[in-house]
Image (tube, rainbow, N blue to C red):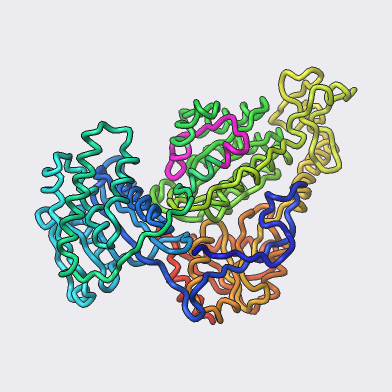
């Protein structure tokens, strides 16, 4: 049964539903999960497969996720891999639950080891009574005294020999292991067979048949061992929910398409690369231009050129690539050219940890480029927000004629999870003054692109429109776009651009409060911390849940100062949770509200936040 969301106000469930584009002050949401008054049920189980790169680790993880979803369960999958062109140790972990799950488990219940390295790295993560699936012919199992005390189930399966028996490649060991897992948790083999056939439908029939046979061999082998193994976890398949299984980058890409994006430009950079891959696969059917540029400087300049011509454009990168875009970001600011920029964070500085996760770029994107000009910074917290907030980002870019930066990170961008289908009716296209009609421009006796308007938003023509000529100038300019260094003109133009930000601040609010508005303890986070925090809170006893709420900030700039100040002042204590070492949101809160966040939980080792760690920290403060 799905968690029930109760909205304690008369405001719409989402700002995207408001016809006039105005976001109300705050939405108060309580998450109720049925069936646990004293202690919330945790995940059903967590499964991990590990091995050398190139041996189908990720594909096996995705098929396992599909298998569990078809059996009626919610899933959340997360990859870990080294920053190597080829080789190194890879793993994919899938967390399975009866209710929606938005985080990865800190322990695992089933470990599939395709090599000895996996056993060395991950066996200590196995929970008490957990199972280790391995090939005794190719891997060595050595358990420490502490691990022996956990009553682990050693499931020996001749993975390599079975691939040969199925007349398949050695790579198909992952498929044998999936069959073994299917039997271990007592799910019908037909579910896995269906997933294999659909996933490999583009392959030759004999290849599909070999994979199904390999999976069945693994399934039969473990079925014979079940009674002896006495593995406690048994699953029962239920009705398959109508859900999507996708990554945060997939959801973001779909949001851009729903918003009418016409061009995407990028240079591949983890963890944003899969946006380029997915949109390139959809370019012909969606009639969009997808460009792989030679570097990030070209990326943003191509994006600006397309947007200048009236094309809804998005560009994508990570922190290192965004560093190269900074000067042209200022060009977008002074020419008031709308542009949507995806900045998928990873740990820095420099190359840092290229394939791991962190929230270290918040302060950077807030202040990137010389001088002062308005921008909007969006930080979606989950896959649903990736879709709807990306669609809204295009509206904000056009409406305020500013760059809008979407901050994600590796944890959100590359994690795969089950979500309800998105509702395209919640998305509409608002281009503001970004595309004036020929008739409107003709009625202007004296068209001034940068005319000082009360709301700071000037009329905008598109190249080729009659009577709409202007100069898009990187120097400070007058109302026509011609360079002008006079004091009065400079003051007028700076104030005009600032007025747009003031208007955006009135209309956009990025603070959402989950839980009891009168709770004594407020947990504060931004962006992708949303999933782990909400999962952690759902595990607390009901009596404690009423005393704790969660303030999530998903639009970081303009900062929702009034809402944040009001909520934190009402709370007795607050806990800040971030994936960085300097509490960047905490500093922003103090800057904008004067409130110092004394209690912090900061993680910056490149690994995601675990709900159990959050829960324990909350209990230590309660």
Q: Is residue 620 shown above or below 212?
A: below
**Residue 367, percent from left and from top:** 62, 48
Question: Which residue occupies the foreground of this view, 351 or 17?
Answer: 17
**Residue 4, percent from left and from top:** 57, 65
Residue 347 visible in the snapshot: no
**Residue 95, percent from left and from top:** 38, 60
Q: Is residue 208 left or right of residue 4?
A: left
Q: Residue at x 47, y 29 (%)?
A: 292
Q: Is residue 266 shown above or below 546?
A: above
Q: Is residue 5 left or right of residue 231?
A: right
Q: Residue at x 48, y 39 (%)?
A: 275
Magenta part of the chain: 255-275
Q: Is residue 74 left or right of residue 29?
A: left
Q: Residue at x 63, y 66 (%)?
A: 6
Quick one: quadrant of the C terminus?
bottom right
* Quarter where residue 334 is shown: top right
* Quarter where residue 592 is shown: bottom right
**Residue 5, percent from left and from top:** 60, 64
Residue 257 inside the magenta-drawn segment? yes
Question: Which residue occupies the foreground of this view, 36 or 460?
Answer: 36
Q: Is residue 544 shown above or below 303?
A: below
Q: Residue at x 82, y 34 (%)?
A: 486
Residue 104 inside the magenta-drawn segment? no
Question: Which residue occupies the foreground of this view, 382 or 202?
Answer: 202
Residue 344 visible in the snapshot: yes
């Amino acid at each position: 049964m799905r968690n029930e969301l109760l909205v304690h106000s008369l405001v719409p469930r989402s700002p995207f539903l408001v016809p006039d584009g105005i976001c109300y002050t705050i939405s108060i949401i309580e998450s109720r999960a049925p069936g646990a008054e004293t202690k919330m049920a945790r995940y059903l189980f967590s499964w991990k497969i590990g091995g050398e790169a190139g041996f189908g680790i990720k594909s096996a993880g995705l098929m396992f996720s599909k298998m569990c979803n078809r059996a009626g369960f919610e899933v959340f999958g997360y990859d870990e891999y080294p920053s190597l062109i080829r080789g190194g140790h890879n793993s994919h972990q899938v967390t399975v639950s009866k209710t929606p799950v938005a985080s990865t488990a800190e322990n695992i219940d089933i470990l599939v080891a395709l090599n000895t390295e996996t056993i060395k790295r991950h066996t200590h993560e196995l929970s008490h009574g957990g199972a280790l699936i391995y090939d005794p012919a190719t891997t060595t199992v050595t358990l420490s005294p502490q691990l022996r005390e956990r009553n682990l189930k050693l499931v020996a399966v001749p993975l390599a020999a079975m691939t040969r028996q199925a007349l398949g490649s050695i790579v198909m060991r992952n498929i044998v292991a999936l069959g073994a897992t299917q039997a271990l948790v007592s799910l019908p083999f037909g579910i896995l067979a269906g997933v294999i056939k659909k996933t490999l439908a583009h392959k030759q029939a004999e290849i599909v048949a070999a994979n199904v046979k390999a999976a069945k061999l693994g399934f039969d082998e473990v079925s014979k061992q079940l009674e002896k193994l006495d593995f406690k976890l048994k699953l029962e398949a239920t009705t398959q929910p109508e859900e999507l299984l996708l990554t945060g980058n997939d959801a973001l890409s779909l949001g851009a398409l729903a918003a009418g994006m016409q061009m995407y430009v990028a240079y591949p950079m983890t963890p944003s690369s899969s946006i380029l891959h997915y949109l390139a696969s959809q370019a012909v059917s969606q009639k969009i231009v997808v460009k792989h540029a030679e570097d990030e400087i070209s990326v943003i300049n191509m994006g600006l050129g397309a947007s200048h011509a009236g094309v809804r454009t998005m560009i994508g990168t990570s922190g290192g690539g965004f560093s190269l875009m900074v000067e042209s970001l200022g060009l977008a600011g002074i020419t008031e050219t709308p542009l949507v920029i995806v900045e998928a964070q990873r740990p820095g500085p420099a190359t840092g940890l290229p394939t791991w996760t962190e929230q270290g770029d918040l302060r950077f994107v807030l202040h990137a480029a010389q001088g002062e000009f308005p921008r909007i910074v969006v930080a979606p917290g989950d896959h649903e927000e990736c879709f709807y907030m990306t669609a809204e980002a295009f509206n904000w870019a056009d409406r305020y004629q500013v760059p809008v930066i979407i901050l994600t990170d590796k944890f959100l961008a590359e994690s795969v999870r089950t979500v309800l289908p998105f509702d395209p009716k919640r998305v509409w296209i608002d281009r503001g003054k970004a595309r004036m009609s020929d008739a409107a421009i003709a009625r202007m006796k004296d068209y001034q692109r940068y005319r000082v308007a009360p709301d700071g938003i000037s009329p905008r023509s598109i190249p080729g429109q009659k009577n709409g000529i202007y100069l898009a100038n990187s120097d400070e300019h007058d109302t026509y776009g011609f360079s002008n260094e006079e004091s009065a003109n400079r003051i007028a133009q700076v104030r005009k651009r600032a007025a747009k930000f003031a208007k955006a601040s009135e209309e956009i609010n990025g603070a959402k409060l989950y839980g009891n508005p009168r709770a004594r303890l407020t947990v504060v986070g931004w962006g992708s911390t949303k999933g782990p925090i909400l999962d952690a809170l759902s595990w607390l006893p009901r009596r404690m849940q009423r005393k704790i709420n969660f303030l999530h900030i998903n639009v970081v700039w303009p900062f929702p100062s009034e809402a944040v100040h009001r909520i934190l002042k009402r709370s007795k204590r607050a806990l800040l949770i971030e994936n960085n070492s300097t509490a960047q949101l905490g500093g922003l809160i103090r800057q904008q509200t004067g409130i110092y966040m004394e209690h912090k939980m900061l993680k910056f080792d490149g690994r995601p936040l675990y709900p159990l760690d959050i829960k324990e920290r909350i209990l230590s403060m309660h």
